[in-house]
Image (cartoon, rainbow, N blue to C red):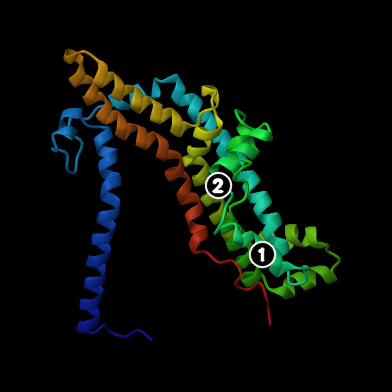
Amino acid sequence: MWRKKSKTDKIFDLILILISLCIMIVIAYPLYFVIIASFSQPEAVLGGKLRFCPIGFNLDSYKMVLSEPKVWIGYRNTLLYTVLGTAINLVLTTLAAYPLSRKDMPARTFFTFVISFTMLFGGGMIPVYMVVKNLKLTDTIWSMMIPNAIATYNLLVMKNYFQTSIPDELQEAAAIDGCNHVQTLLKVVLPLSTPILAVILLFYAVGHWNAFFNAVLYLRKQELFPLQIILRDILLQNSLEAVGGDLTGMYEKVMRGETMKYALIIVASAPVIILYPFIQKYFVKGIMVGAIKG
């Protein structure tokens, strides 16, 4: 029943709202500052005059960034690595997590332990590089996807979801109806696992989008560089031009590099920011309610 809030409850709600607003401002303002700085005059940004609104609104930084042909090459490569790599990740993670979640799988505990052990101990960078090189994957698109085809943490999260959120009765009912393990996975388990699939997809997609270390290790051809490496090179190039240029043009180059830095952040982050609202609902939405009756 509805009851009127007491004075103590109202004070508590007010304090909670104020704390939430403070946390939101602390988190949101740096992103907001990057956005307005990318549209402002470089002098205002370096002079510390920027607070809440752009000063000297202009699109020069974005024009400089988007006029670089290498940026579009980086976008193309990163989109390819993200889409193809995430698809590989999801397929392999699902195919590994489902058997480990089945109680009737032989030696399930042993295989789970072996997989979990890799979270604590790894071969190291040099052995992994030697394996990738001996497999002839260096300077290919597969070097950006195969070495990280399965993330152990994501695998264990999906396995636990299958165990705790998919009732055994549903899988037993599917077996009684004549479904084999593959049909049970495709027709019963996956349709009821949309939330965890969306979460794992977001984890993998963001990881691929921000990936740069594998590119540094395995790629030498510039036409295969992802966006993050391209943006780093642009920043370094502008820094070197500012340091090594003539004194008359040095100030202008420093100014240009400052606002370009913020524009590069927006250009690199925009696709992920746009994608997130379409997946965010699955983080809080459960679809298991009503799956089992009686």
What residue is drawn where x is 25% and y is 42%?
33
Quick check: 239 left or right of 269?
left
Q: How many marks?
A: 2
Q: Position of residue 280 (x, y in %)?
A: 47, 55
Q: In the image, which disc is placed on residue 211?
A: none
Q: Amino acid at mark 1?
A: Thr
Q: Position of residue 72 (x, y in %)?
A: 47, 25
Q: Residues within 10 Å of mark 2 (few under 14, many from 20)?
A: few
Q: Position of residue 155 (x, y in %)?
A: 61, 58
Q: Quadrant of residue 266?
A: top left
Location of the N terminus (image quadrant): bottom left
What residue is drawn where x is 53% and y is 45%?
205
Instruction: Please give the residue where the numbered disc 2 appears in the rendered image.
Output: 124
Quick check: 205 left or right of 258?
right
Instruction: Please give the residue where the numbered disc 1 appears in the rendered image.
Output: 112
Q: Residues within 10 Å of mark 1 (few under 14, many from 20)?
A: some
